[in-house]
Amino acid sequence: MKRLQAAWKETGPLARNKSQALWKEFRGLCDEVFKKRDEAYTLRAADLEAAKARAVALCEEIDAAAADSTGERLTGNAKIGEWQAVFGEIGELPRADARGLQNRFDRAIHGYATRLAEQDQRDAQAAESSLLEAGQYIRAYERAVMQEAAPEEREYLRNAAENFIASVKRWPAGGQQALMQALARADGASGTSKQASETALRMLCVRGEILGSMTTPPEDEALRRDYQMRMLTEGFGQARQADDRDWDAMLLEWIGVGAIAPEAHDALERRFMECLASRSDDDGRH
């Protein structure tokens, strides 16, 4: 339009009455174009502000979800994908606000993902605690069987174990199966395997101390040397970092070991739990 206005000035002279009429028509056309331009700018500015409002509302929705401790992990992962898709569909944002809104959205998503990860850690810790507590119920029943307690006492203790297991909603992978196998084993328990069971528990402690780079008590140093020598002989002595699969497998093995005297078992379990705690410190799992 500016070029056309400049070209108008370069046209030759016309009769006054024709010149005024044409100028009036030309100016009207110019005004109409500029009016449409202003309307387009207004609509664009409104669209950008609406996009900004949608982006802010989405960030606030994510922040609110992150503050809610009742969310489910699986649905939470799906929500992250949905939110990312929605933010991508918002379209162009005001230039002055675009970077700040993108950063705010990224922070909101990161905060929500962090909350999910923390919830995972708490759930995993609770599941392991439940597994060890269920093991206590089973061992109490197993000791009653070994001591040939009255049938009603054995039945009471077995029912207590079954009821506790049934009340727990989440177990570590393979945990419930390991508990049911331990409960079935307890039905036919005898006192002849106590020494083997204690050795198995001590060995699990030693393995945990090796994986956690912890020292082993003097009474089990020989057991540790023998185990490490066997691993070297079998070709597994190279240094490596333990992963969760090692710890999870050991935890299930712990549940599968038969009952020994309560005091001895409790002392070894505290030692084993210290090994699990070293895993938590190393990888930030709990």
Image (cartoon, rainbow, N blue to C red):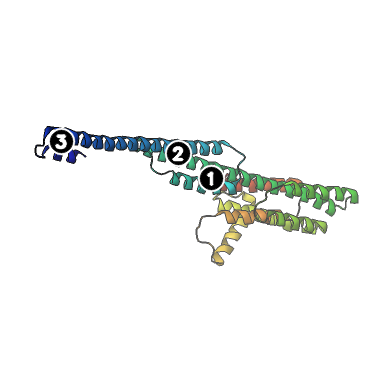
Q: CA distance from mark 3 to mark 2?
A: 55 Å
Check disc 1: other Cα within 10 Å, few if <14, some if 14-19, many if 20+: few
Q: Nearer the viewer, residue 130 or 68?
A: 68
Task: Specify the quadrant that holds the N terminus.
Answer: top left
Q: Earlier in the sequence, mark 1 or mark 3?
A: 3
Q: Amino acid at mark 3?
A: Lys
Q: Position of residue 65 (x, y in %)?
A: 55, 38
Residue position for label 3: 18
Check disc 3: other Cα within 10 Å, few if <14, some if 14-19, many if 20+: few
Q: Residue furthest bottom?
A: 234
Residue under the image location 45 percent in, 44 percent down? 87
Q: Amino acid at mark 1?
A: Gly
Residue position for label 2: 55
Q: Amino acid at mark 2?
A: Ala
Q: Please name which of the two marks, 2 or 1, marks the residue nearer to the observer.
A: 2
Q: Nearer the viewer, residue 286 or 206?
A: 286
